[in-house]
Image (cartoon, helix red, strand yellow):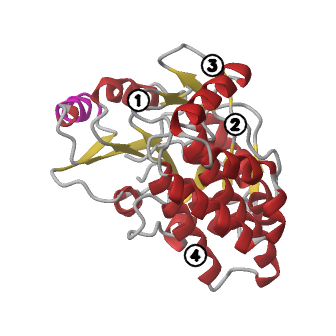
């Protein structure tokens, strides 16, 4: 008999965290699941950790690869292997809290019209020990307009949702995009109702290998997501202004993040500000565009000192949309 839930765990060279991620699934209070571990060509001993887990628990299925491909293609592989009615994702450096599956299965069972249950994730900085709860949209129902309006600050993460497998079959990840990630929920939201549960069910780690390391790549990848979204046959054309506004905001914020996080590609940052203004002329008056263009005119040593002062005054936390979760 097929399990109720398939957990797809994507792994790549994070062996120091992998065993704990696996245990966070095996220790769930809900036991009717399969754990499908898809390793994307690790070279750090992760394969041996995966084999040991499969040997000690029959619910663990492993797919170990020597070649590193796009995360999107590996997530599609996990969905193809899944036999459960519901699917949940996990990355090898993150964790489930013990009641995640029990709580979310009960919610989807109680709401047969709902396609996705989601919750606010907890954050953990392993370098400083800091803990917090991420901001997330706190709405139920048809969320597509709200997600477009608030994606940068209140988007869904990839791991806290539990999703009906039928939706992931209907909306597979785009293989050609390095990592569509949580943006797949934008497409699902065009047709499926979502249900918000306020209890956190996952912990997202931040560490020295995943904090803001790929602003430009992540940005270009997300613009590809938005292009696919706009061309999708189910895209509601009445929401195009919201999509254009979102595109302008992420262009603006990419330029700002490049400057504020010490990036030296001044020409690219200026280009992002200009592209944002072309999308929405009102962006020309936004403080990030005005101050960002000003920063690009400063000599490099002075710009660095301004950034350092700003970080000391406000504290620094990378914008979630640029968190480098790629596996």
Q: CA distance from mark 3 to mark 1?
A: 18 Å
Residue that carries the numbered disc 1 in the rendered image: 21
Q: Which mark is residue 120?
A: 2
Q: Which residues are magenta?
A: 48-57
The reply to whether the magenta stretch includes residue 16 is: no
Q: Position of residue 70 (x, y in %)?
A: 34, 59
150 or 285, nearer to the observer: 285
Q: Earlier in the sequence, mark 1 or mark 4?
A: 1
Residue beneath disc 4: 227
Q: Bin the neighbour count of mark 3 within 10 Å (Cα to Cα): few under 14, some 14-19, many 20 and up.
A: some
Question: Where residue 191 sits in the image (x, y, percent)?
Answer: 71, 72
Give the CA separation, mark 4 to mark 2: 27 Å
Q: Earlier in the sequence, mark 4 or mark 2?
A: 2
Q: Secondary structure at mark 4?
A: helix
Mark number, residue 261 = none
Q: Nearer the viewer, residue 30 or 39?
A: 39
């Amino acid at each position: 008999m097929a399990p109720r839930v398939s957990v797809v765990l994507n792994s790549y060279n994070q062996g120091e965290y992998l065993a704990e991620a696996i245990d966070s699934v095996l220790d769930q209070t809900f036991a009717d699941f399969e754990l499908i571990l898809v390793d994307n060509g690790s070279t750090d001993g992760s394969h041996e950790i995966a084999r040991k887990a499969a040997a000690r628990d029959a619910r663990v299925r492993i797919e170990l690869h020597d070649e590193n491909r796009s995360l999107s293609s590996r997530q599609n592989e996990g969905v193809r292997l899944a036999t459960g009615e519901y699917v949940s994702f996990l990355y090898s450096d993150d964790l489930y809290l013990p009641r995640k599956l029990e709580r979310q299965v009960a919610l989807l069972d109680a709401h047969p019209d709902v396609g996705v249950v989601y919750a606010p994730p907890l954050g953990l900085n392993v370098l400083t020990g800091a803990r917090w709860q991420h901001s997330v949209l706190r709405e139920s129902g048809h969320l597509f307009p709200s997600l477009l309006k608030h994606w940068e600050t209140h988007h869904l993460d990839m791991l806290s949702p539990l999703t009906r497998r039928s939706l992931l079959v209907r909306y597979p990840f785009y293989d050609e995009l390095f990592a569509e990630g949580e943006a797949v929920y934008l497409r699902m939201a065009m047709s499926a109702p979502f249900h918000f549960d306020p209890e956190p069910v996952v912990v997202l780690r931040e560490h020295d290998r995943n904090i803001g390391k790929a602003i430009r790549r992540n940005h270009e990848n997300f613009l590809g997501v938005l292009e696919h979204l706009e061309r999708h046959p189910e895209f509601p054309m009445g929401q195009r202004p919201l999509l254009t506004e979102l595109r302008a905001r992420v262009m603006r914020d990419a330029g700002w993040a490049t400057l504020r996080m010490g990036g030296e590609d001044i020409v690219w940052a200026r280009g992002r500000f200009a592209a944002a203004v072309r999308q929405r002329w009102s962006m020309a008056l936004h403080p990030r565009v005005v101050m960002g263009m000003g920063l690009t005119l400063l000599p490099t040593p002075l710009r660095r000192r301004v950034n350092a002062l700003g970080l000391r005054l406000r504290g620094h936390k990378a914008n979630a949309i640029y968190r480098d979760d790629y596996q």
